């Protein structure tokens, strides 16, 4: 492959790829993202390859291993194009049937279709599935269409045309103007206007400017950025190139966690391919613009997602935030002007350039434009990645797209914004989701984590869980953050273990206030949120733990006990057999009892009892 | 640019580069801090210094927030008080309240702060985390991890001041702790110890402890190297507890090296002399000091009577005070009546003077050391600064960290500054320095980077220099010196472009063959780049001992009275004759080398050696031995029974620097006070008193009752020390000698109008193969270390961190001889031989070997020969064979 030396080279190549592809060729798009891989996608892929070869169908069908399609709950997923037949929970043994029925013949295998939860009707096409049809997948949509390790796929769908437009039809100022006009706000959590950031960086004095892609996604349960880097790395690179051109940078970094091996691999492949095509390197497309990208792998410290700590880490220093009175856009990496955006922000850029700010800013609310990808997890039927326009309500996300709470349980709260976000109770479910409204509720947008909790979730325990994470992930620099979070965690542990006492809630509030007000970086300033927001909305639960030594959600082991309902118990012995500590005794066909001294409150008896005879008290 | 702001209702004007904390402090507004340290960049970890700024949501740390126009700052409020109190309480949860047994008790910032805030209870009860105590990066410091409040000062200090990054905050979150991640890079300087606000790092050396208010603190000048660091001797019941510093004092700015901080326990060594010794047949027998002094006086008188004045010689000391050296030369010149007086300073100053005086008019360090902080390029030649003068290295690292200074290191050996720090590292073969320096000059001129205005205005003879250096093409330089052409060109570009370029050189140049030619060429280099009389420029010869400069200034010299007044100058003779009341000889005396040569021929009959141990420190021990054996009478004044003293007829116990008053003159020409913190041990007395007593016994009382009296006389008769009073030294923390309006030489032009380029006498190295002794053996450390060796470990702390001696050999050379790392080898030179273990690696270039001379029981001196005034004491041809 020779390098593109002009816009024309790229355009001709694009035409060549498109012309060489048969639009009617059947494509089996199998999600090969980390989640579906865990379900066995790799074995399914092998089975497809074998089957296609065995049946000699190479000319009629192509297997494409793609990035994340989003509906992780139902993986492994495949979509068969051009008809967009959507099969879910596919396994290795379904492969030959899929080939014979849906490729060789034109039949649909009903067993693999998604069934509408309400109408109970099977749904054939992907875009008719409720999980998908309420979404607006302008950023993540291409994930299920392209092979992320093949740059030609990206080019075929119009990839790098935004770069062309930026280089040949626009100048740096007009690019920045467009991004400002689109009112794109940083998707990493802060929501800072991207165009304004670019402009400040461009105007900062110095001959060297850097751009950085922050892919150090560390929130538990969040994987939006990982999926984009794994599924469509070129869209991120293209965004960085456009940004670099606008800012006047010739060197970029992708800082990605080493715990994301597939993302590291795919982004490295993408960079290599872009270099081979002359889309990275010297004189890109024959212009004066030269730019290259390096990949730095993060060591797994949560705080390195903070911009200044991240830059310190790239420099090989202790990943510790520094005071930002001099903004990183003026003095960042190696003390040079540096523009850092997160993965999703960069991926928005080609879209804005291609379709224009006017189109883009029609999506979303007044102050929050475009879409946002959330990772919807927890006690919700359809876990997965969802991309929705800003302004959609929490209720729509959780109930319409997410399919509500499973097992008929009651919704209790949704935690947004990652570990230092807050918990929002049901009464606010109709709040439109945007940067400002979530903050008003004592939570935040963060990078897009969304954890649904049902009635069986103890809010004190939830707060304790997040503080446990944060106490380990604080960099340890500020006294208030390092010591304060630990002390809050200890108080919460006391409360959940029945040692809570009068005044603990007030002490938590006071300490939370100090930690939030006296710590340097966002981590410390927001770390008390899980505690403060749960106290705000669920104070009665705290009080029940402290005053009545009772856990209303029946989660905190020290405050509950298991007892067998002597009326309901049939003496089947199932609980007795399954008890790991032999705490249950009883004769056959006679009611059993639990020895409270021996019981470790593991809950297995409660789970295995077929007669609902084990009560949590 | 200045900005106006309001702090606590007070309108304040300050410069825009200040932080809010600095602005507040300037204006007497108190903000509590724990992690802040004025020497370090702001850390911002303790959060005690938070302030409120109108319109800003969160309180801000004032130590990291710069001032801004018209901001309104509040430093005291209920909200802030709550944050500060809580931050302190949070620290106290884990901090053990072991104050009674903590070294920092009474001077602990946390203790003070908790007391000040009146915190008497902590609501947070938690299980204390017991952190395991692991050995620190140096045995001289003990780390108490449970006491650590993780302020980060030690990490910052190690990074910013010593530039070594030994320490780091390891782990994260609640598991964060201080850890020595690169212990092998630790220089044991104790910078971390000195900045620790609590007792998490403590001095692990001294067994004696006392509280701050019990101890006596005496500010004085360090007696190790020539930098002249100011330090405090802390004593309790007349015993040294430890050494501390005051930030505002001295060029060291509160820092010290390992020798300064931990190398003074020899003061209490069991081996110290408490009594005088007198030779009775073979043995030295203790005797009363007055008896010894009167015997010495009598004997000196007899020898003078019998053989005349010139049968006598005096050897002074580079680590005794100006007053002692002054009184010594006065005694030798007037009472005895000879100019046969010298010291080891001449080994340094002979070549310096011969090289630079004809070119510049003076052969001294031209700029104060703090000028290095302003330099943007520094060439460091032939000196391992970290090993010997760490404070100078610290300045370079500070400049590199804050000012983007680009270092060019020239050393055939790998030293701590060469790797990782140097922009260019050139490794010339020994004794080829003249060639590369002139090559550098040629390259700078050919690039047009010379300072044309300066050359025109201030120099003569540039054209001849230009012509002379033509021959030193990069190709030729590479051929002779082994320096890569690219490195030479890079160095030329850097130094040529430098706004202020400094040239630092040590004994690697001064003590080599043809040192005069090399040093003169360095003078030329500084001149063509206009780096003299300029802030941040300058020539910096690095001297070995604390008073090398002072000894030379005080006239420990056969040619000059104090202040370089020739002994043959009639006016000077007249003045001194009048002052001293005795006849003065109008004749040059013998230099140090000649003194020993003549003594070995039996022509010198008696000698007083004051505070020097030439048998170890003079680079030809065989000669010294022979000389002493041929003497009729030898008096040694010293605080230890040195190898030289063992051969004396009378040994009179002197005191250490900690037991006396006086002054030292540092290598940057700064006269600073030495103050007694301890009483003299046993019968020992200050060397000046001993000399004065001998003089008195000989019928010539000198009428000095204190060192101040002597200094007053020095100031009166020594032009370069003129107009300086003892009181000034006390009040202003020292004074610069060699006049001028500023401490920088040549700012008002050169003596005699213009500097000269002089190329006629520049000698080039002769290429001759020495088959018998093919290795160039270089020696380092300095000749004057009398503190450690495997036999005597007088400074116990230093003995802990300095490994035993070895000879460093290049691996290729070693291979040829079948020598492996750790093997015993025999080093032979024309003059003698030594056995030592070998260390084999590629840290040194082929054909060169290196040996430390910091060990007094390894007689390196016998490998050398001294037969001329300028002794190449740093290098000798040798052979190395497996033992």
Image (spheres, rainbow, N blue to C red):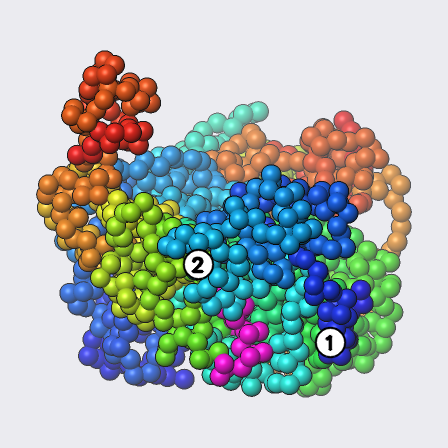
Q: Which mark is residue A19?
A: none
Label 2 resides on the chain identified as A
Question: Is tag 2's residue or tag 1's residue first in the polypeptide sequence?
Answer: 1
Q: Which residue does the numbered mark 2 point to in the structure image?
A: A131
Q: Which quadrant of the figure contains the C terminus of chain A?
A: top left
Q: Which residue does the numbered mark 1 point to in the structure image?
A: A11
Q: Residues within 10 Å of mark 1 (few under 14, many from 20)?
A: some
Of B618 and A336, nearer the camera is A336
Q: Residue at x 32, y 40 (%)?
A: B146
Q: How would you classify the magenta stretch by its main secondary structure?
A: helix
Magenta span: A332-359
Q: Are marks 2 and 1 on the same chain?
A: yes
In space, the residues marked 2 and 1 are separated at their CA atoms by 36 Å
- Expressed as whole percent of the image width and height from the top left, the position of residue B381 reads 67, 58
Label 1 resides on the chain identified as A
Q: Residue at x 75, y 45 (%)?
A: A55
Of B274 and B649, nearer the camera is B274
């Amino acid at each position: 492959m020779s390098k593109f030396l002009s816009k024309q080279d790229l355009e001709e190549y694009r035409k060549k790829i498109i012309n060489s592809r048969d639009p009617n060729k059947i494509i089996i798009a199998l999600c090969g993202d980390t989640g579906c891989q865990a379900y066995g996608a790799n074995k399914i892929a092998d089975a497809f390859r074998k089957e296609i070869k065995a049946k000699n169908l190479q000319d009629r069908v192509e297997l494409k291993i793609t990035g994340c399609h989003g509906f992780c709950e139902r993986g492994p997923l495949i979509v068969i194009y051009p008809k967009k037949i959507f099969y879910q929970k596919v396994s290795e043994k379904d492969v030959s049937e899929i080939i014979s029925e849906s490729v060789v013949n034109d039949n649909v295998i009903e067993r693999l279709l998604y069934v509408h939860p309400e109408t109970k009707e099977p749904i054939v096409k992907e875009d008719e599935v409720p999980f998908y049809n309420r979404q607006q997948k302008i950023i993540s949509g291409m994930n299920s269409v392209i092979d992320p390790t093949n740059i030609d796929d990206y080019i075929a769908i119009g990839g790098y045309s935004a770069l062309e437009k930026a280089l040949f039809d626009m100048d740096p100022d007009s690019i920045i103007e467009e991004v400002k006009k689109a009112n794109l706000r940083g998707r990493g959590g802060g929501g800072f206007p991207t165009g304004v950031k670019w402009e400040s960086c461009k105007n900062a004095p110095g001959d060297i400017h850097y751009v950085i892609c922050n892919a150090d996604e560390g929130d538990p349960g969040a994987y939006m950025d990982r999926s984009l880097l794994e599924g469509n790395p070129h869209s991120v690179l293209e965004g960085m190139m456009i940004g670099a051109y606008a800012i006047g940078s010739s060197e970029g970094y992708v800082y990605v966690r080493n715990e994301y091996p597939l993302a590291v691999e795919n982004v490295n492949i993408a960079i290599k391919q872009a270099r081979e095509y002359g889309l990275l390197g010297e004189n890109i497309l024959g212009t004066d613009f030269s730019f290259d990208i390096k990949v730095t792998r993060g060591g797994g410290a949560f705080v390195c997602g903070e911009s200044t700590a991240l830059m310190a880490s790239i420099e090989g220093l202790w990943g510790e935030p520094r005071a930002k009175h001099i903004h990183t856009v003026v003095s960042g990496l190696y003390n040079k002007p540096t523009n850092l955006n997160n993965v999703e922000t960069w991926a928005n850029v080609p879209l804005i350039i291609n379709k224009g700010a006017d189109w883009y800013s029609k999506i979303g609310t007044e102050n929050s434009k475009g879409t946002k990808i959330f990772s919807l997890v927890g006690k919700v039927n359809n876990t997965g990645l969802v991309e929705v326009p800003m302004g959609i309500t929490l209720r729509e996300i959780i109930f319409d797209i997410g399919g509500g709470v499973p097992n008929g349980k009651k919704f209790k709260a949704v935690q947004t914004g990652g570990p230092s976000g807050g918990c929002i109770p049901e009464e606010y479910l109709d709040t439109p989701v945007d940067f400002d409204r979530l903050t008003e509720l004592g939570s935040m947008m963060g990078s897009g984590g969304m954890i649904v909790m049902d009635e069986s979730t103890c809010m004190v325990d939830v707060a304790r869980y997040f503080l446990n994470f944060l106490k380990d992930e604080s960099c340890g620099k500020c006294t208030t953050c390092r010591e304060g979070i630990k002390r809050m965690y200890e108080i919460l542990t006391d409360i959940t273990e029945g040692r809570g006492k009068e005044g603990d809630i007030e002490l938590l509030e006071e300490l939370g206030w100090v930690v939030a007000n006296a710590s340097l970086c966002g981590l410390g300033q927001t770390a008390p949120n899980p505690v403060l927001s749960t106290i705000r909305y669920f104070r009665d639960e705290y009080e029940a733990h402290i005053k009545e030594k009772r856990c209303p959600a029946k989660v905190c082991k020290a405050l509950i006990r298991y007892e067998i309902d002597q009326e309901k118990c049939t003496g089947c012995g199932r609980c007795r057999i399954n008890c790991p500590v032999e705490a249950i005794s009883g004769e056959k066909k006679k009611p059993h009892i639990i020895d409270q001294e021996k019981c470790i409150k593991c809950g297995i008896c409660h789970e295995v009892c077929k007669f609902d005879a084990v009560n949590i008290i | 640019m200045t900005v106006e702001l309001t702090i606590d209702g007070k309108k304040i004007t300050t410069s825009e580069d200040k932080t809010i904390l600095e602005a507040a402090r300037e204006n007497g507004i108190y903000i509590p801090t724990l992690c802040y340290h004025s020497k370090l960049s702001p850390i911002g970890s303790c959060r005690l210094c938070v302030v409120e700024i109108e319109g800003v949501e969160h309180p801000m740390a004032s130590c990291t927030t710069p001032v801004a126009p018209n901001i309104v700052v509040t430093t005291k409020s209920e909200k802030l008080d709550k944050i500060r109190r809580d931050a302190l309480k949070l620290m106290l949860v884990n901090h053990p309240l072991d104050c009674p047994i903590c070294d920092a008790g009474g001077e602990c910032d946390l203790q003070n702060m908790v007391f000040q805030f009146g915190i008497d209870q902590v609501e947070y009860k938690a299980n204390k985390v017991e952190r395991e105590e692991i050995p620190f990066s140096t045995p001289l410091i003990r780390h108490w991890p449970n006491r650590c409040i993780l302020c980060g000062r030690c990490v910052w200090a190690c990074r910013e001041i010593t530039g070594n990054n030994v320490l780091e905050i390891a782990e994260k979150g609640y598991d964060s702790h201080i850890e020595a991640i690169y212990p092998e890079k630790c220089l044991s300087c104790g910078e971390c110890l000195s900045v620790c606000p609590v007792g998490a790092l403590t001095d692990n050396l001294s067994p004696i402890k006392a509280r701050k208010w019990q101890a006596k603190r005496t500010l004085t000048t360090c007696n190790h190297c020539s930098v002249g660091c100011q330090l405090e001797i802390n004593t309790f019941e007349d015993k040294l507890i430890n050494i501390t510093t005051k930030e505002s004092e001295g060029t060291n700015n509160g820092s010290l090296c390992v020798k300064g901080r931990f190398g003074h326990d020899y003061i209490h060594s069991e081996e110290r002399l408490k009594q005088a010794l007198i030779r009775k047949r073979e043995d030295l027998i203790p005797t009363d000091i007055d008896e010894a002094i009167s015997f010495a006086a009598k004997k000196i008188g007899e020898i003078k009577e019998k053989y005349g004045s010139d049968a006598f010689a005096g050897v002074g000391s580079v680590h005794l005070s100006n007053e002692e050296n002054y009184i010594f030369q006065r005694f030798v010149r007037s009472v005895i009546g000879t100019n046969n007086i010298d010291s080891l300073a001449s080994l340094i100053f002979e070549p310096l003077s011969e090289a630079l005086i004809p070119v510049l008019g003076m052969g001294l360090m031209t700029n104060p050391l703090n000028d290095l902080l302003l330099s943007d390029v520094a060439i460091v030649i032939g000196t391992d600064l970290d090993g010997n003068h760490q404070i100078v290295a610290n300045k370079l690292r500070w400049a590199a960290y804050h000012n983007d200074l680009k270092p060019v290191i020239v050393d055939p050996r790998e030293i701590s500054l060469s790797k990782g720090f140097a922009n260019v590292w050139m490794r010339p073969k020994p004794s080829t320095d003249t060639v590369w320096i002139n090559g550098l000059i040629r390259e700078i001129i050919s690039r047009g980077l010379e300072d044309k205005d300066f050359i025109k205005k201030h120099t003569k003879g540039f054209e001849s220099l230009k012509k002379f250096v033509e021959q030193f093409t990069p190709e030729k330089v590479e051929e002779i010196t082994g320096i890569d052409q690219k490195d030479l060109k890079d160095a030329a570009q850097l130094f040529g472009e430098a706004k202020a370029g400094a040239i630092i050189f040590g004994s690697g140049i001064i003590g080599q063959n043809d040192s005069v030619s090399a040093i003169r060429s360095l003078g030329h280099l500084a001149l063509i780049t206009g780096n003299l009389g300029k802030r941040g420029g300058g020539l910096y010869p690095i001297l070995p001992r604390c008073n090398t400069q002072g000894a030379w200034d005080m006239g420990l010299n056969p040619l000059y009275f104090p202040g370089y007044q020739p002994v043959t100058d009639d006016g000077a003779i007249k003045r001194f004759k009048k002052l001293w009341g005795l006849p003065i000889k109008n004749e040059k005396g013998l230099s140090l080398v000649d003194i020993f040569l003549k003594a070995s021929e039996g022509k010198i009959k008696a000698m007083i050696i004051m505070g020097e141990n030439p048998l170890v420190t003079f680079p030809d021990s065989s000669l010294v031995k022979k000389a002493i054996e041929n003497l009729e009478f030898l008096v040694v004044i010293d605080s230890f029974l040195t190898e030289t003293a063992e051969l004396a007829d009378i040994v009179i116990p002197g005191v250490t620097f900690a037991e006396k008053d006086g002054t030292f003159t540092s290598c940057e020409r700064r006269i600073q006070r030495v103050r007694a913190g301890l009483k003299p041990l046993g019968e020992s007395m200050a060397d000046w008193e001993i000399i004065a007593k001998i003089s008195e016994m000989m019928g010539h009382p000198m009428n000095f009752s204190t060192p101040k009296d002597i200094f007053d006389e020095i100031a009166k008769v020594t032009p370069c020390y003129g107009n300086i009073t003892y009181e000034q030294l006390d009040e202003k923390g020292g004074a610069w000698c060699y006049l001028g309006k500023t401490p920088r030489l040549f700012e008002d032009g050169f003596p005699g109008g213009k500097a000269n380029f002089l190329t006629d006498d520049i000698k080039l190295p002769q290429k001759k193969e020495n088959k018998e002794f093919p290795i160039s053996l270089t020696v380092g450390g300095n000749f004057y270390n009398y503190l450690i060796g495997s036999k005597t470990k007088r400074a116990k702390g230093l003995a802990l961190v300095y490994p035993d001696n070895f000879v460093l050999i290049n691996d290729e050379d070693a291979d040829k001889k079948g020598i492996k790392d750790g093997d015993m080898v025999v080093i032979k030179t024309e003059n003698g031989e030594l056995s030592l273990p070998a260390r084999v690696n590629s840290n040194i270039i082929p054909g060169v070997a290196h040996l430390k001379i910091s060990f007094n029981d390894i007689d390196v001196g016998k490998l050398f020969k001294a037969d001329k005034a300028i002794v190449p004491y740093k290098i000798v041809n040798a052979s190395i064979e497996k033992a």
